[in-house]
Image: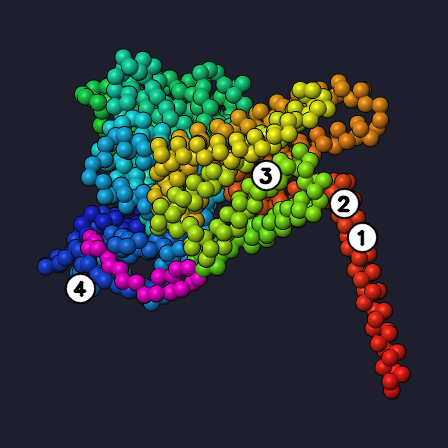
């Protein structure tokens, strides 16, 4: 090894480490001593400050906030959370001033600070902040509450459409700190692991910015301490007969081994096909597998597709077996996201392979004998030197023995707990530049122009259908068109509703989310209209069944449409009334939880499944079965028609009915998918198709319908001819008056 020249720097805080570099570029630790500074204070006092708060329409108003007291070296958030346009939370450090032996706040120009209060982009920061505030205000956090909160946190972080920002990492760390304190419920382990895996899927720029805040290291410390506290999951050999347990994730996995119950002493990680592995093995991800190792390295070096391996030494296993109580457990964390372990301000040292954390919670000391051995393989081909190193939550250290064999590096560790990996040294590493998305505030007139235009076009199409029915009595009296008119009436109500909620000024006037009673009324009306709409979809299919399946070519009873209308407009009142009476809060549950400021007032929870989703699925299945049966009947009955025109009329009418049900149902399929799964594409398709339904119906059932088209052409021709005749009658007297005037002159 090279000799390391060390320069001692004395600063105030006892035990604070000063970072120096040796000639090879690796960082080393230097313990410092305290200066003799009498009457020093290690606390920054509370301080009030003023910033600019930006709301809707970029309206800026001054806001007063305050910094709570902080100890030296602490980086804290203000009393009122402030989200910056870069997605970073506003934070400030309490620094030590060497010149006068005091601590003081970091200098900051608050005149340039802008806090966003209403963000236009799709982010989950406000939801995380609300979750943290509720959690912080809870008097008692029991195990069931912890499990529920972590489940909600997983759902938030799993939103693929949401834009991840550094503030999400900071708030998630705050939430996890409260959840994991004094936690003893083992069911939290996979949920916390899932949260870390979701965070590690974030953009590298966001992770790097979070590192500069110290958030990543805080997250690692919180979660690793929690995993260590959960060792009791492996304490009892009777309940855990195999002596090991693991929790697997795409980017991070954790493993528990009890030496008193098993001969397993470590794990090996492989890539490629699982056919080359000797069982048993476990799939970590699509192309990664792990298996547990026995007491030594026998056969491991020569195994194909080996990426990495960890094995605890016999000396450590023997020592751990002697522990009393619940501490005789060995634990391994495996991180495949090396970006978490890079110093944000000094990026010369880059992990070149999987990062492992090895620990035994009851064993925390450095020893003269080896505690663990690791076999590491570089994931990238590089000519740069790679060394075994360990991470102390801030920087990498070259204090681990290593040697190479068959393109693999074997590392020996004398430290527990420790993060270990191979580090590549970049001699001329440039300072990384973070490229973060700039957040903007919501426009005061943020109108979905496409939806408004589509609604207007749909209403225009529906209006044309109503005009057609008023002018042409023969067309209006057809059975199929009577059903069509009722459907158009329901669609008109829905289109007016969608038009109102897409215009902010109208939405605020009609659907006031601060007034839950008004929101409940709007939710009931929307629920009722949807149920009426579904019933008319069913009656369209039932009508065609009577005409072409029950008795081929027969006409339904004259009062069929009247009965359908009474059922379609009355039955939904019963279903809506039951929901309103039994579970009225379901109409406002989204609003009360504050999930989305512009959310629709509609049923949620069990009422959503029983009063919306179930009827829709039943109607859709019934329509599908009826039309399949009708098509089969028609195929077997068309031979009865000797005239081609009759055959074409039957096919045309059935095709129109199928098209009608398809257009109406496919729209609501996307609407339900958008409601159940938070994917923006489903919601956009639903808005577009539902808004254009009136146009589709007018084009298909009026313009493409020969009877309606011929009636309109005849009507237009008649009107033009009448106008021409009237113009001729008016022009004749005018010519006579002209002659009389000329004679008079």
Separation of disc 3 and disc 4 at Cα?
84 Å
Judged left or right of residue 481, residue 717 is: right
Query: In the rendering, which numbered label is found on residue 717?
Result: 1
Q: Give the mark toward the camera: 4 or 2.
A: 2
Query: In the rendering, which numbered label is found on residue 100?
Result: 4
Q: Residues within 10 Å of mark 1 (few under 14, many from 20)?
A: few
Q: Residues within 10 Å of mark 2 (few under 14, many from 20)?
A: some
Quadrant that contains the C terminus:
bottom right
Judged left or right of residue 727, residue 69 is: left
Residues drawn in magenta: 53-71
Decide whether residue 69 is among the magenta residues: yes
Separation of disc 1 and disc 2 at Cα?
10 Å
Decide whether residue 213 is among the magenta residues: no
Separation of disc 3 and disc 2 at Cα?
21 Å
Say which label, 3 or 4, has the lower sequence index: 4
Query: In the rendering, which numbered label is found on residue 486?
Result: 3
């Amino acid at each position: 090894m090279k000799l390391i020249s060390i320069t001692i720097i004395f600063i105030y805080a006892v035990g604070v480490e000063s970072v120096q570099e040796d000639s090879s570029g690796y960082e080393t630790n230097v313990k410092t001593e305290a200066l003799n500074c009498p009457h020093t204070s290690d606390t920054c006092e509370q301080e009030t400050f003023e910033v600019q708060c930006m709301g809707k329409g970029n309206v800026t108003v001054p806001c007063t906030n305050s910094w709570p007291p902080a100890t030296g070296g602490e980086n804290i958030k203000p009393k009122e959370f402030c989200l910056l346009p870069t997605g970073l939370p506003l934070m400030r450090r309490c620094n030590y001033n060497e010149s006068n032996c005091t601590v003081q706040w970091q200098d900051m120009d608050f005149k340039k600070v802008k806090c966003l209060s209403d963000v236009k982009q799709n982010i989950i920061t406000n939801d995380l902040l609300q979750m943290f505030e509720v959690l912080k205000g809870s008097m008692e956090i029991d195990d069931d509450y912890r499990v529920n909160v972590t489940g909600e946190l997983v759902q938030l972080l799993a939103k693929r459409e949401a834009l991840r920002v550094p503030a999400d990492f900071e708030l998630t760390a705050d939430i996890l700190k409260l959840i994991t304190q004094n936690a003893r419920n083992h069911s939290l382990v996979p949920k916390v692991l899932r949260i870390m895996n979701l965070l590690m899927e974030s953009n590298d720029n966001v992770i790097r910015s979070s590192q500069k805040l110290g958030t990543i290291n805080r997250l690692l410390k919180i979660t690793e301490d929690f995993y260590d506290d959960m060792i009791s999951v492996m304490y009892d050999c009777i309940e855990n007969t195999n002596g090991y347990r693991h929790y697997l994730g795409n980017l991070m996995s954790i493993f528990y081994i009890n030496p008193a119950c098993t001969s397993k002493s470590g794990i090996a990680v492989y890539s490629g096909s699982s056919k080359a592995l000797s069982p048993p093995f476990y799939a970590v991800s699509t192309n990664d597998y792990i298996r547990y190792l026995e007491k030594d390295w026998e056969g491991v070096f020569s195994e194909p597709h080996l990426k990495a391996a960890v094995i605890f030494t016999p000396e450590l296993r023997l020592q751990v077996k002697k522990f009393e109580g619940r501490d005789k457990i060995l634990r391994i964390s495996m991180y495949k996201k090396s970006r978490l372990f890079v110093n944000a301000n000094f990026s010369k040292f880059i992990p070149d392979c999987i990062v492992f954390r090895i620990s035994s919670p009851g064993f925390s000391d450095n020893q003269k004998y080896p505690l663990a051995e690791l076999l590491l393989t570089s994931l990238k081909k590089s000519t740069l030197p790679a060394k075994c190193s360990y991470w102390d939550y801030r920087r990498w250290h070259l204090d681990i023995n290593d040697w190479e064999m068959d393109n693999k590096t074997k590392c020996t560790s004398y430290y527990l707990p420790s993060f270990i990996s191979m580090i590549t040294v970049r001699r001329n590493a440039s300072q990384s530049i973070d490229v973060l998305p700039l957040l903007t505030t919501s426009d005061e007139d943020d109108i979905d122009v496409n939806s408004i235009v589509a609604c207007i076009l749909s209403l225009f199409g529906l209006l044309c259908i109503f005009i057609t029915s008023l002018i042409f009595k023969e067309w209006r009296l057809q059975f199929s068109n009577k059903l069509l008119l009722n459907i158009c009436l329901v669609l008109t109500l829905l289109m007016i509703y969608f038009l109102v909620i897409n215009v902010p000024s109208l939405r605020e006037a009609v659907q006031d989310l601060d007034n839950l009673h008004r929101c409940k009324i709007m939710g009931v009306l929307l629920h009722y209209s949807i149920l009426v709409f579904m019933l008319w979809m069913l009656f369209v299919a039932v009508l065609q069944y009577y005409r072409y399946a029950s008795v081929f070519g027969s006409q339904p009873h004259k009062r069929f449409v009247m009965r359908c209308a009474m059922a379609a407009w009355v039955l939904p009142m019963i279903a809506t009334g039951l929901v309103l009476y039994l579970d009225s809060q379901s109409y406002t549950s989204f609003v009360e939880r504050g999930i989305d400021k512009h959310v629709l007032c509609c049923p949620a929870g069990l009422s959503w499944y029983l009063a919306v989703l179930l009827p829709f699925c039943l109607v859709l299945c019934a329509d599908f079965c009826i039309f399949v049966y009708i098509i089969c009947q028609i195929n077997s009955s068309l031979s009865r028609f000797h005239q081609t025109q009759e055959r074409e009329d039957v096919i045309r009418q059935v095709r129109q009915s199928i098209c009608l049900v398809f257009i109406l149902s496919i729209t609501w399929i996307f609407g339900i998918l958008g409601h159940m799964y938070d994917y923006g594409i489903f919601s956009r398709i639903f808005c577009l198709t539902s808004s254009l339904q009136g146009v589709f119906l007018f084009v298909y059932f009026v313009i493409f319908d020969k009877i309606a088209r011929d009636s309109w052409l005849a009507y237009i021709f008649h009107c033009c001819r009448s106008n021409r005749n009237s113009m001729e009658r008016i022009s004749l007297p005018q010519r006579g008056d002209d002659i009389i005037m000329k004679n008079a002159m």
